[in-house]
């Protein structure tokens, strides 16, 4: 029997398994590249580590060029939000490993955290479980001149809580009765509400989960709940379809981001977000660096060696 004829329990041949491991390796390298985005300057798009085809290099250069351009527009949007005292809430929903965190990072990467902040709430504690369901989310809503990005939101009740049995049927139905009215109230109060669902395929989630398993820097992202969500893929699909159908309202419609290609998803989502607001470039007074005041009697005292961090690098 040839090696290519050997199959594992899932029916994959040895060649399929090798190809999958190569894909995981490439994804891990890409993830490290993505972390370098914080340091990469738009004048230097060098190729750190590993040989790439000319086509891959061209795609990567295009991605960085567009990312930096869109992030420049996000800075303009931020200035306009502050100047106009606009209030914005953006919800990011989707399956585990769908790429929500990646796009949130790219949106906030170059913005002022006092203007644009992220709300990623943990599971409710015993006290919060006794509160009105939306109460703990309401405390994170923006004031004038602020943008709040929810990394998962009140839609947990329509997703994970429903699928995992963390809410009763009555609580589930009450959520669907309440959420349209809650969101309409937010909009009437002057908050612009934008809702994104990041969509990936069954196969893509499987691949990304394997990538996390094989990447020691990302294993922490795989919680027991994530692994269980993988087993209940179809249940989550049904819950998602019901959620979109029952909460897609004119005041706050859902927008679905095709997220199998992570880089394209980030660019498409940011471009769409920018198109949702009538922002304009805000004029600023020229910044002039003042002269430093110097005094003849000033003496700078040396720092004791015992306080200095060793220069290992």
Image: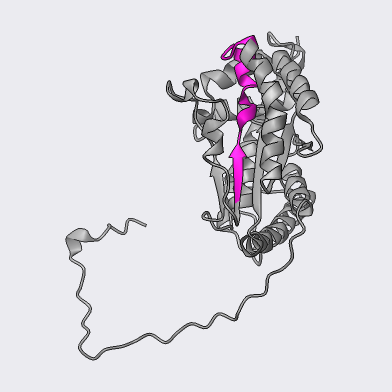
State which region is magenta: 147-169
Residue 96 within the magenta-colored segment of the rendering: no
**What residue is rendered at 67% in x and 58% in y?**
74
Task: Name the one closer to the observer, 17 or 225.
Answer: 225
Quick one: 280 or 198, which is closer to the camera? 280
- Identity of the residue drawn at 66% across and 67% down: 43
Outermost residue, bottom side: 296
**At x 44% / y 24%, what residue is drawn?**
125
Query: The C terminus lies in which quarter of the figure?
Result: bottom left
Quadrant into which the N terminus falls: top right
On whether residue 163 falls in the magenta region, the answer is yes
- Residue 222: percent from left, percent from top: 54, 25
Residue 44 appears left or right of 60 = left
Q: Quadrant of residue 167?
A: top right
Q: Is residue 291 above or below residue 224?
A: below
Q: Residue at x 52, y 54 (%)?
A: 113
Number of numbered discs present? Answer: 0
Q: Is residue 308 above or below residue 164?
A: below
Q: Position of residue 182 (x, y in %)?
A: 66, 33
Describe residue 307's horizontal placement relative to residue 140 as left or right: left
Which is nearer the eye, 5 or 41? 41
Residue 306 in sight here: yes
Residue 15 appears in the picture as rendered: no
> Where does the image place residue 289, in percent across and percent down from the top left?
48, 82
Q: Tell me the colour scheme of the image.
A: one colour
Compared with residue 174, is residue 251 higher up or lower down, i.e. above or below?
below
- Quick one: 12 or 92, which is closer to the camera? 92
Q: In which quarter of the view is residue 310 placed?
A: bottom left
Query: Residue 64: horizontal and vertical position, in percent?
Result: 70, 56
């Amino acid at each position: 029997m040839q090696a290519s004829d050997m199959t594992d329990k899932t029916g994959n041949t040895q060649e399929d398994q090798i190809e999958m491991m190569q894909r995981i390796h490439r994804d891990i390298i890409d993830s490290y590249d993505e972390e370098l985005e914080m340091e990469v300057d738009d004048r230097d798009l060098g190729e750190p580590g590993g040989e790439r085809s000319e086509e891959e290099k061209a795609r990567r250069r295009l991605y960085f060029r567009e990312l930096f351009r869109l992030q420049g527009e996000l800075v303009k949007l931020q200035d306009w939000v502050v100047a106009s005292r606009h209030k914005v809430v953006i919800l990011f929903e989707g399956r585990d490993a769908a790429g929500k965190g990646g796009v949130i990072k790219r949106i906030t990467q170059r913005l002022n955290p006092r203007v644009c902040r992220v709300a990623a709430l943990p599971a409710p504690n015993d006290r919060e479980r006794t509160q009105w369901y939306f109460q703990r989310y309401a405390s994170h809503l923006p004031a004038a001149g602020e943008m709040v990005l929810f990394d998962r939101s009140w839609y947990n009740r329509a997703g994970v809580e429903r699928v995992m049995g963390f809410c009763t049927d009555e609580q589930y139905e009450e959520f669907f009765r309440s959420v349209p009215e809650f969101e309409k109230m937010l909009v009437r109060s002057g908050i612009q509400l934008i809702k994104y669902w990041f969509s990936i395929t069954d196969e893509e989630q499987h691949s990304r989960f394997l990538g996390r398993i094989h990447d020691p820097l990302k294993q922490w992202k795989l919680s027991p709940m994530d692994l269980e969500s993988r087993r209940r893929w179809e249940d989550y699909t049904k819950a998602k379809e019901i959620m979109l159908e029952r909460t897609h309202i004119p005041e706050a419609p859902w927008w679905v981001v095709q997220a199998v290609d992570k880089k394209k998803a980030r660019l498409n989502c940011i471009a769409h977000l920018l198109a949702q607001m009538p922002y304009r470039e805000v004029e600023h007074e020229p910044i002039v660096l003042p002269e430093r005041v110097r005094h003849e009697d000033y003496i700078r005292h040396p720092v004791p060696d015992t306080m200095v961090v060793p220069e290992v690098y």
